[in-house]
Image: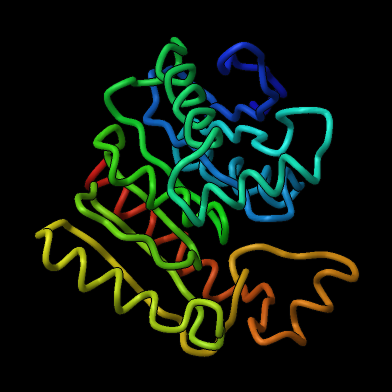
Amino acid sequence: MQTDVRFPAGNTTLPATLTVPDGDGPFPALVMIYEAFGMTAEMKRVARDLADDGYATVIPDLFARGPVRPLCIANVMRTVLTGRGQALDDLEAARRWLAERPEVDADRIGTIGFCMGGSFALLLARTGLYKVSAPFYNTAVDLPRSCPVVASYGGRDLMTRGVPEKLEAQLDALGVPHDVKVYPDVGHSFYTVTPGLMGEIAKRSPIHGEYHEPSAEDAHRRIVTFFREHL
């Protein structure tokens, strides 16, 4: 079941999409951080796919804090670059709210994110509050510590050139279980469909952003296998 909800975040509430598997819980759960396009139908579709595999998911709408959306987006992007900011507080509020849900196993919460959200998934991986992190095509994040990580990248994505190798080296040094894979024939955003003009621009850009079904299906199998072991 997928519903629109609101959760308390500081002195306000923020919108989110909650997706819960059918059947009896409590279920392992994920805090999902969307890509730079925000709360799209594709992000909600990913959450439904994960629910089919038994994972409850909340997608907090980080871009909804405040009346001026472009300013909200800029502030969230700044947090990605600095590792500090309101967006991290809002994600922690979402995690606490999720953990209190009766259908969720509070001891089995992970995170998954795409592009911008992938970088957030790694920022959350180092907090000690998550069992597992699944970043997709993120930028580089320093990891002084980390939970287990399953990460996916496109070999034709110039934006993430060198990032998988750096991430794997950090996780090797930390002795953290991980599965880092580069799909050589695809670019950015291979896991989801980017419709319309933005999708056409992404295809022709240096990131070569385009959905690729075989790679997406393999990545889905990998993350579910990893979650079943570590979450």
Seen at 82% across and 78% down, the residue is: 201
Judged left or right of residue 168, residue 204 is: right
Residue 188 percent across, percent down from the top left: 60, 74
- The residue closer to the viewer here, 64 or 178, is 64
The image quarter containing residue 219 is: bottom left
The image quarter containing residue 100 is: top left
Seen at 54% across and 26% down, the residue is: 22
Q: Is residue 68 above or below residue 35?
A: above
Seen at 37% across and 30% down, the residue is: 28
- The residue closer to the viewer here, 46 or 65, is 65
Quadrant including the N terminus: top right
Residue 229 percent across, percent down from the top left: 22, 47
Quadrant including the C terminus: top left
Q: Is residue 175 above or below residue 92?
A: below
- The residue closer to the viewer here, 171 or 102, is 171
Judged left or right of residue 199, residue 17 is: left
Residue 220 percent across, percent down from the top left: 47, 60
Q: Is residue 142 above or below residue 73?
A: below
Residue 110 percent across, percent down from the top left: 36, 39
Seen at 76% across and 47% down, the residue is: 41
